[in-house]
């Protein structure tokens, strides 16, 4: 499954629009829209696999890259065309304000997002490591032909992988919509951070990605605090460059 | 003789390049058959087409008389054909136990999983001795045993093994050949690929020779050993 989804940020953007319109049109709080966003994005991931990825998988690397890159451009332009470039905001979500954790103040929506990310991680990890389907999914990612010879319908596993990944993005988007503007280009920065995090941890290594996520978050905050907020991402990307030069397989390697 | 596996007039292309030209073979129930041929002859391509990883352009593959040509690989396992790929191809980052367990993934094999696991672990103790280890950390010989154990978990009627002895020390080769005989005695028909004629024919009762994608020779081990054709192809004499 060595294929990177360059439309990851655009998936996030769509999930945020799902949450925004659920609020604007249906008066649903993002927390209630979350399951909706998860389902919508899982369906989109599934459709992306069957409609696009499947047809370029055997092809040259460049075709694979341009396929998801093209999808990203299409989704971004489509969002601009349909919904304009305005920044939209979900007003007065249920979760707002800050709470004190000891001496530190944390935004409540951000806290909820962290907790949700942790829950999603634990669920995903358990599913992959323990369930029959999860192990078959890992096997498919590691050797597609050998997995097929075990009786695994690898096409379905790929579709499942895309649905799962996009479903997680759905949850992230709904939570993010509680405290961040929604606009067609919103996915860019987040997706870039996501690629850095995944590459930092090691591709395909789920627990390492969690650890790398914490590292990236801390670097971002401290760089903003100690140096200057304007260059916090520069520091993150510098760290990323340094680590990738030193350990191309990521901090923790594969598994 | 009613063949368990029969391959007729198989044409297979990889991209634009035609690898197999009317290849054929037949394997009767209970046999051990060797598939011989020099590098690049198309031996692996032939097995990969039988197990459904490749689709032929022409030709027929039947199992017990029923056509399986063009079925996807994950359906062909269910028909009773096991395939151990060239270079073992274990799932490197799964444990040995997970690898072997996955061998019985298809619905028809799930029921008797525990019992079958115990049976293959008796034949290949490495499966339990190294059960919790990641597969890529095993030695080549151990990997080949785990690959065979995994292939047996589906309880195949026919087990196809692509170069089981590749890169193994003589002592391990002998051990592995004995294990393959034991598998065969329990009723599993064997079709295996091997480049070394002597070794192949010491294990097999019959053999087929592929050359440049064509089936050029076949016969009993005895006949092939004495065949001038085999000498020409393998020794360039
Ligand atoms: N993806 C591919 N595209 C084009 N040609 C290929 C491809 N894979 C293999 N071939 C060619 O097909 C021919 C047959 O390959 P195959 O692997 O079946 O041979 P083999 O008899 O198993 O050889 P070996 O003993 O070296 O394993 C070879 O000439 C090889 O170069
Ligand atoms: Mg080969």
Image (tube, coloured by chain):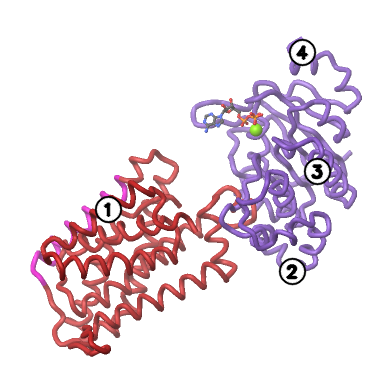
Chain colours: A red, B purple
The nearer-to-camera label among 1 and 4 is 4
Which mark is first along the chain, 3 or 4?
3
B145 or A241, which lies in front? A241
Q: CA distance from mark 1 to mark 4?
A: 56 Å
Q: Chain of mark 3?
A: B
Q: Decide if ligand 1 comes within 8 Å of the CB at mark 4.
A: no
Which mark is first along the chain, 4 or 2?
2
Query: What range of the chain is rendered magenta?
Result: A66-87
Locate residue A251, reporting x and y percent.
40, 56
Which mark is first along the chain, 3 or 2?
2
Q: CA distance from mark 1 to mark 3?
A: 51 Å
Q: Chain of mark 2?
A: B
Q: Which mark is residue B232?
A: 4
Q: Which residue is mark 2?
A: B111
> Is residue A203 rendered to the left or right of residue B112?
left
Q: Which mark is residue A71?
A: 1
Q: Residue furthest front?
A: A226
Quarter holding ligand 1 = top right
């Amino acid at each position: 499954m060595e294929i990177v989804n360059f439309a990851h940020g655009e998936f996030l953007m769509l999930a945020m629009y799902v949450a925004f319109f659920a609020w604007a049109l249906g008066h649903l709080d993002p927390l209630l829209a979350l399951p909706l966003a998860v389902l919508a994005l899982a369906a989109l991931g599934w459709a992306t696999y069957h409609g696009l990825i499947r047809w370029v998988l055997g092809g040259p690397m460049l075709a694979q890259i341009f396929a998801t890159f093209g999808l990203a451009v299409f989704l971004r332009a489509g969002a601009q065309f349909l919904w304009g470039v305005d920044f939209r905001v979900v007003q007065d979500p249920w979760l707002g304000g800050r709470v004190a954790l000891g001496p530190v103040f944390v935004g409540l929506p951000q806290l909820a997002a962290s907790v949700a990310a942790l829950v999603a991680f634990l669920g995903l990890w358990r599913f992959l490591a323990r369930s029959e389907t999860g192990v078959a999914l890992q096997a498919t990612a590691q050797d597609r032909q050998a997995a097929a010879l075990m009786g695994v319908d690898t096409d379905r596993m790929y579709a499942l992988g895309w649905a799962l990944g996009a479903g997680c993005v759905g949850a992230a988007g709904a939570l993010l919509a509680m405290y961040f503007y929604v606009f067609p280009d919103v996915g860019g920065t987040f997706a870039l951070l996501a690629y850095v995090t995944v590459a930092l941890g090691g591709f395909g290594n789920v627990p390492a990605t969690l650890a790398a996520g914490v590292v990236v978050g801390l670097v971002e905050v401290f760089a903003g605090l100690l140096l200057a907020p304007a260059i916090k991402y520069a520091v993150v990307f510098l760290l990323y460059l340094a680590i990738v030069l030193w350990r191309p397989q990521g901090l923790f390697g594969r598994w | 003789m009613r063949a368990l596996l029969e391959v007729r007039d198989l044409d297979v292309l990889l991209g634009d390049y035609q690898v197999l030209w009317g290849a054929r073979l037949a394997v009767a129930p209970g046999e051990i058959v060797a598939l011989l041929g020099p590098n690049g002859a198309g031996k692996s391509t032939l097995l990969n087409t039988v197990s459904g990883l490749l689709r032929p352009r022409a030709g027929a593959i039947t199992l017990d008389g029923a056509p399986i040509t063009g079925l996807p690989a994950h359906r062909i396992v269910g028909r009773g054909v096991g395939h151990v790929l060239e270079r073992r191809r274990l799932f490197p980052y799964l444990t040995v136990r997970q690898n072997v367990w996955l061998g019985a993934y298809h619905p028809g094999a799930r029921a008797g999983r525990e019992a079958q696991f115990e049976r293959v672990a008796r034949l290949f103790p490495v499966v339990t001795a190294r059960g919790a280890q990641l597969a890529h950390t095993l030695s080549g010989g151990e990997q080949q045993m785990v690959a065979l154990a995994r292939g047996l978990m589906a309880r195949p009627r026919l087990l196809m093994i692509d170069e089981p002895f590749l890169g193994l020390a003589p002592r391990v080769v002998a051990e592995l050949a004995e294990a393959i005989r034991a598998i065969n005695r329990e009723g599993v028909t064997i079709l295996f690929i091997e480049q070394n004629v002597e070794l192949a024919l010491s294990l097999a009762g019959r053999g087929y020779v592929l050359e440049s994608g064509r089936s050029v020779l076949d016969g009993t081990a005895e006949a092939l050993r004495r065949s001038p054709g085999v000498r020409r192809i393998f020794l360039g004499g």
